[in-house]
């Protein structure tokens, strides 16, 4: 409850400090969005892409998920949040750039690379979509996540 009160107070500070101070920007954003880029970033709470890239509201169309993954093209393949978001960004918003932002200490990528799925029934299957990338790393002479890529487990545990 203490954290929720802190978030509410933060929203009030946003309204006073930013929203009231930059009416022109927010009036422009009320008319619509015209971001120059789309970004696929990890849902990790430590990765604040707006802070990292010094963004203003409206600069970047954002897709966030565990391990910043883009699933393979599969029309009719069920719920397609990431493809739908990227389709909208490219076709409707006409973004000029699509950025995939990875980060150090990613729990999703760690689970993928080490073959140990996190607790739950969805995450292991989700990160498994990067299995081909993982296997191509197995042929790399570089070390990934402190593990020699040549000694990676042969399959994800899920
Ligand atoms: Zn991550």
Image: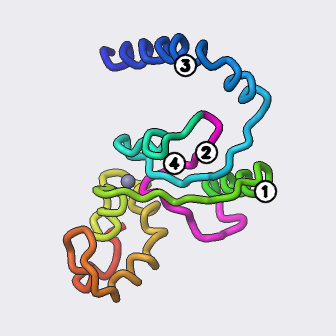
Residue located at (25% from left, 68% from top) = 145
Residue located at (76% from left, 54% from top) = 94
Say if 114 sits above or below 107 in the image.
below
SS under mark 2? strand
Label 2 environment density (alpha carbons within 10 Å; few <14, some 14–19, many ≥20): many
Q: Nearer the viewer, mark 1 or mark 3?
A: 3
Q: Nearer the viewer, mark 2 or mark 4?
A: 2
Label 4 environment density (alpha carbons within 10 Å; few <14, some 14–19, many ≥20): some
Report how far apart the C-alphas of labels 2 and 3 lie in the structure: 18 Å
Residue 155 image point, x, y percent: 34, 78
Residue 114 image point, x, y percent: 27, 69
Report how far apart the C-alphas of labels 4 and 3 lie in the structure: 24 Å
Q: Is residue 131 left or right of residue 55?
A: left
In the picture of the structure, the residue carrying the numbered disc 2 is 60
**Of marks 4 and 3, which one's residue comes earlier in the chain?**
3
In the picture of the structure, the residue carrying the numbered disc 1 is 91
Q: Main secondary structure of the magenta part?
A: loop
Can you tell which mark lies on residue 78? Answer: none
Say if 150 sits above or below 45 in the image.
below
Residue 78 falls within the magenta-colored stretch:
yes
Residue 9 image point, x, y percent: 42, 12
Look at the image and tell me in which quarter the C terminus lies: bottom left
Q: Nearer the viewer, mark 2 or mark 3?
A: 3
In the picture of the structure, the residue carrying the numbered disc 3 is 18
For the record, the magenta segment spans: 57-79
Tell whether label 3 touches label 2 (CB within 8 Å): no
Report how far apart the C-alphas of labels 2 and 1 lie in the structure: 15 Å
**Of marks 2 and 3, which one's residue comes earlier in the chain?**
3
Q: Is residue 88 left or right of residue 39?
A: right
In the picture of the structure, the residue carrying the numbered disc 4 is 64
Look at the image and tell me in which quarter the N terminus lies: top left
Say if 10 sits above or below 40 in the image.
above
């Amino acid at each position: 409850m203490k954290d929720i009160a802190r978030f509410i107070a933060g929203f009030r500070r946003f309204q006073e400090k930013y929203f009231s101070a930059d009416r022109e920007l927010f009036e422009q954003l009320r008319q619509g969005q015209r971001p120059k880029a789309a970004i696929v970033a990890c849902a990790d709470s430590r990765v604040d892409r707006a802070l990292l890239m010094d963004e203003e509201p409206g600069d970047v169309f954002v897709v966030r998920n565990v391990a910043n993954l883009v699933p393979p093209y599969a029309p009719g393949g069920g719920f397609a949040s990431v493809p739908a978001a990227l389709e909208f960004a490219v076709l409707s918003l006409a973004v000029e750039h699509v950025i995939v932002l990875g980060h150090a200490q990613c729990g999703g990528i760690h689970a993928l690379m080490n073959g140990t799925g996190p607790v739950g029934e969805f995450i292991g299957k989700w990160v498994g979509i990067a299995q081909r990338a993982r296997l191509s790393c197995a042929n790399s002479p570089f070390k990934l996540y402190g593990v020699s890529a040549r000694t990676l487990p042969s399959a994800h545990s899920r």
